[in-house]
Image (spheres, helix red, strand yellow):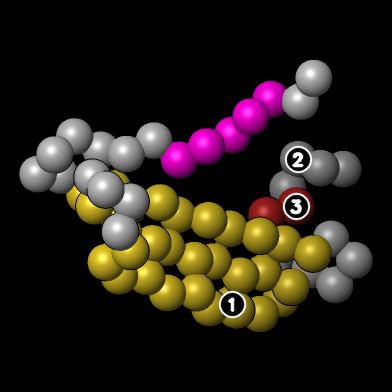
Amino acid sequence: MANDIKWLAPENGWVKLNTYGAILLNTFSTAIGRVIKDAYGNWLRGYSMVLGKDEVLLIGLY
């Protein structure tokens, strides 16, 4: 059985910042994203952007 991954809400009165990063190993293209949600899971702010090519994240993979 696969592990279920789900978002856990912060306590009332708090917000949660989730950060994501990704790299395509065949092209070294990288991207990041962030989202801020309240205790009810409502989206407050967020963004995503492509950073371009980067090999620094591959240190330790070889």
Disc marking residue 58:
3
Which of the image's four quarters has the N terminus? top right
Residue 37 position by quadrant: bottom left
What's the CA distance linking mark 3 and mark 1?
Answer: 15 Å
* Magenta extent: 3-7
Q: Label 2 crowding class (10 Å Cα cut-off): few <14, some 14-19, many 20+?
A: few
**In this view of the protein, can residue 22 be seen by the observer?**
yes
Which of the image's four quarters has the C terminus? top right
- The numbered mark, 1 or 2, whose residue comes first in the sequence reads 1
Q: Main secondary structure of the magenta part?
A: loop
Disc marking residue 36:
none
Disc marking residue 51:
1
- The residue at which mark 2 appears reads as 60
Residue 15 image offset from top left, x and y in percent: 21, 49
What amino acid does circle 3 point to?
Leu
What's the CA distance linking mark 3 and mark 2?
Answer: 6 Å
What amino acid does circle 2 point to?
Gly
Residue 11 image offset from top left, x and y in percent: 18, 34
In the displayed structure, 62 sits above or below 30; it is above
Determine the residue located farthest toward the top in the rendered image: 1
What amino acid does circle 1 point to?
Leu
**In this view of the protein, can residue 56 be seen by the observer?**
no
**Are discs 3 and 2 less than 8 Å apart at CB?**
yes
- The numbered mark, 3 or 1, whose residue comes first in the sequence reads 1
Disc 2 is placed on an element classified as: loop
Q: Label 1 crowding class (10 Å Cα cut-off): few <14, some 14-19, many 20+?
A: few
In the displayed structure, 18 sits above or below 1; it is below
Residue 59 image offset from top left, x and y in percent: 73, 48
Residue found 50% across the figure and 74% down from its top: 48
Is 51 on the left or on the right of 44, as rendered? right
